[in-house]
């Protein structure tokens, strides 16, 4: 018991001392700037913001590296879902192209990107994610897939084409934490 208490005390002391700031400055502007930087850094915490050039890119890194998915990346960032897309998974992401977002009614994307619509945007984006790591061919065996928003998306097969929630898979990219299926439409929940 004494050993456990001693470990707790030492751990608490380490946490306390490492969280203290060693900030000494005579310039109040420099202190304010440092304070602002720490606020920005707090907003960008988690696995999504760790630089890693050695492992296989995760689903978020694949989207961020694609010039055809800038709208999707902007939406993920606006909904603050970056960390959800870098977890261990496996995750299967149906990634609409910029053209798919452009096909939505005029003003839809701009409206969804507003801070007051963050929850609605997050719900739509979660409808593009499901647990698993299934190839396009393996998806042909499914009638539906359960999405991260709690709804299902219907799976249809038309020849060699696989259509999920009305969006055709046009390409697939393996990821370190799953797979990215590039789709030609935004998959909207039915409710």
Image: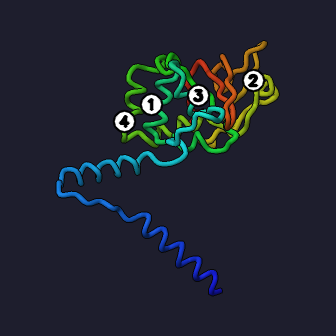
Q: Is 171 or 65 nearer to us in this picture?
A: 65
Q: Which residue is mark 4?
A: 114
Q: Is 190 or 111 nearer to us in this picture?
A: 111
Badge 4 or badge 1: first in the primary sequence: 1
Residue 147 image-quadrant placement = top right
Cα gap from disc 2 to disc 3, whole angstroms: 18 Å
Q: Is residue 187 left or right of residue 43?
A: right
Q: Which residue is mark 2?
A: 136
Q: Are marks 1 and 3 in contact (CB under 8 Å)?
A: no
Q: Is 16 or 186 nearer to us in this picture?
A: 16
- Mark 4 Cα-neighbour bin, 10 Å: few <14, some 14–19, many ≥20: few
User: Mark 2: which secondary structure?
Assistant: helix
Residue 89 image-quadrant placement = top right
Q: Which residue is mark 3?
A: 62
User: Mark 4: which secondary structure?
Assistant: loop
Residue 174 image-quadrant placement = top right
Cα gap from disc 4 to disc 3, whole angstroms: 25 Å
Cα gap from disc 1 to disc 2, whole angstroms: 26 Å
Count of marks placed on residues:
4
User: Mark 3: which secondary structure?
Assistant: helix
Marker disc for residue 74: 1
Q: Are marks 4 and 3 in contact (CB under 8 Å)?
A: no
Q: Are marks 2 and 3 in contact (CB under 8 Å)?
A: no
- Mark 3 Cα-neighbour bin, 10 Å: few <14, some 14–19, many ≥20: some
Cα gap from disc 1 to disc 3, whole angstroms: 14 Å
Vertical arrangement, residue 184 with respect to residue 88, above or below: above
Q: Are marks 1 and 2 in contact (CB under 8 Å)?
A: no
Q: Nearer the viewer, mark 2 or mark 3?
A: 3
- Mark 2 Cα-neighbour bin, 10 Å: few <14, some 14–19, many ≥20: some
């Amino acid at each position: 018991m004494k050993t456990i208490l001693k470990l707790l005390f030492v751990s608490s002391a380490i946490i306390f001392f490492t969280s203290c700031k060693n900030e000494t400055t005579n310039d109040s502007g420099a202190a304010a700037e440092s304070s602002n930087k720490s606020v920005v850094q707090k907003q960008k915490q988690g696995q999504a913001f760790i630089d890693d050039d050695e492992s296989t890119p995760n689903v978020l890194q694949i989207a961020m590296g694609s010039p055809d998915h800038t709208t999707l990346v902007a939406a993920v960032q606006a909904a603050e879902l970056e960390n959800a897309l870098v977890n261990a998974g496996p995750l299967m992401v149906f990634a609409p192209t910029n053209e798919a977002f452009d096909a939505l009614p005029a003003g839809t994307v701009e409206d969804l990107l507003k801070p007051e619509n963050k929850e609605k945007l997050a719900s739509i984006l979660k409808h593009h994610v499901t647990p698993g790591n299934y190839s396009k061919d393996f998806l042909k065996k499914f009638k539906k897939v359960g999405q991260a928003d709690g709804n299902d998306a219907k799976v249809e097969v038309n020849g060699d084409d696989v259509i999920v929630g009305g969006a055709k898979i046009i390409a697939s990219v393996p990821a370190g934490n799953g797979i990215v299926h590039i789709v030609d439409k935004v998959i909207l929940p039915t409710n």
